[in-house]
Image (spheres, helix red, strand yellow):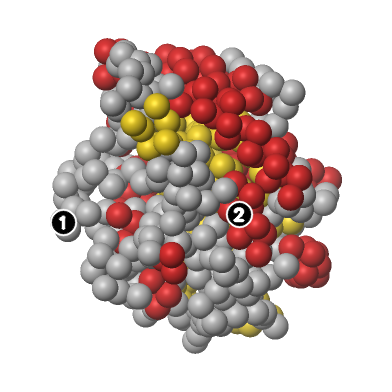
Amino acid sequence: MFFSRHAPRPLLLGLLLTAGSAQAADDTDAGRQWQPGDHHVHSEWSVDWDRSTSPPTPVRGGDSHYTRTRNAQAAHAYGLTWIVHTDHGGPGHAAVDRDQAWPALQQARQAVPELVQFHGMEFNVPAGEHASLIIAPSADERGQLYEIERRYSRGDAFPEDPRDDRPQRMLEGLAYMRQLSPTPLMIINHPSRTATGMGRWGDVTPAELQAWHAAAPQVLVGMEGAPGHQASAQHRGLYRNAPAPTLGGFDQMVAVVGGVWDQLLASGTRLWITANSDSHVNARDGGEEFDPGQYSKTYVWARHTPQDLMDGLRQGRVFTVTGDLVDALSLQVGTPDGRAVAQLGGQVALSAGAPMQVRLRTHRPADVNAHGQRPRLDHVELIVGTPGTEGPRMHSRVFGEQDWRREGDWIVAEWTLPVPAGGAFVRARGSSTPERIPAPDVPGEDPWQDLWFYTNPVFVVPASS
């Protein structure tokens, strides 16, 4: 196996962020720094099935031949500080997770103690597709995942449970998870992979996303903005329907300004986005994926503890990036004098019509990425959405080299505009390419030449009199 240590080491990154003040510090932020991770990683316990037996017999290594320890070593080598082990389900897979995958997780934790490693699975959504299920470490993490998977993951029962095809089953599962302590997290995977065109949805619809989040807002917290499988030469992200590709490696729900994600945010739905590898088999071994952290990273503003990492994911203190285009940032929205300011995932109350300053700072990594590049940021875009009667009203401003200012390896873009009367949300993105609108991905393109970052939003609410 081959791992490259091109990503910044966590200690160096921590010192860098402390010096750069990537997020405004207060008492609740003490000890926090940007923690890069991956919530969707497969191992040998994504088994195949021998269906000549009844019930089917799990076949180890069916969908990936990597051990959990090997994946943890790869994640650490590529600069990650946390990962989630998420193997596929299937008939009786709850017992595989309990009796085989969980002991393998203990071995991986012992082998790579520098990495926070979560127990989890790729949950089969009833009447839907897939989601990353993240279990909070506790004395009962093994039993908690077993019960969730056994009761609610589509296809675990044998013979098949007809309730798996009922949308209501997912809502029942979320209601069950909502009352667990500690509370697990769920992130919907590759939401538009089964779409048949732009805006023609498949197994995941905007209405379902909204309903699932509403049923358990502290459980179902997000969706993959940038799906895995980015090393696929033919279908980036394994989005195989040609009329519905990824756009700059990101899902159409997220990449289209004014699209599904913006519509959800404008409605008040606090649904966050992430990025991951969906690692099965690395491209150098004949597969279609990158290793954890090799190409995609989800950064969480948190202390290096399982509890604060989960809190950061739950509260939206997150940005996503491919190819190490940036390794730290802050997005602040508030009054120009700085007296009222909110950060990623947060909210600030401002008076309608008063000046509102949006301030984005991004940091360029000091080292080359896993492809041997030190990518250059071509532009950033600040995006403001406000609620409208026929969907969100979107405003944006693009900043290039002539528009921003530099502070060492930091780029600073500022935009002052009036506070919208009905409130707003603000998010940002940027690219290594000159594309202002990410182009549809095509077979054969090099993902290393098409790098993007996306932030989660900051919310602005009307100030009371």
Task: Give, as a three-letter code, the residue at label 2.
Answer: Arg
Which residue is rendered at x = 27% and y = 19% of the image?
165
418 sits left or right of 62 in the view: right
First in residue order: circle 2 vs circle 1: 2
User: Which percent across, then down, holds residue 126?
Assistant: 34, 23
Q: Position of residue 100 (x, y in %)?
A: 58, 31
Residue 157 sits in quarter:
top left
Q: CA distance from mark 2 to mark 1?
A: 37 Å
Label 2 SS = helix
Instruction: Name the quadrant of the C terminus.
Output: top right
- Amino acid type at image mark 1: Pro
Residue at position x 46%, y 15% in the image: 151
**Label at residue 296:** none
Circle nearer the viewer, 2 or 1 = 2
Identify which residue, 125 or 158, lies in the foreground: 158
Marks 2 and 1 close (CB-CB < 8 Å): no
User: Which residue is disc 2 drawn over?
Assistant: 70
Residue 334 coordinates in the image, percent (x, y): 62, 54
- Give me the residue at 22% from left, 54% from top: 240
Per the image, the residue denoted by label 1 is 243
Circle 1 Cα neighbour tier, 10 Å, few/some/many (<14 / 14–19 / ≥20): few
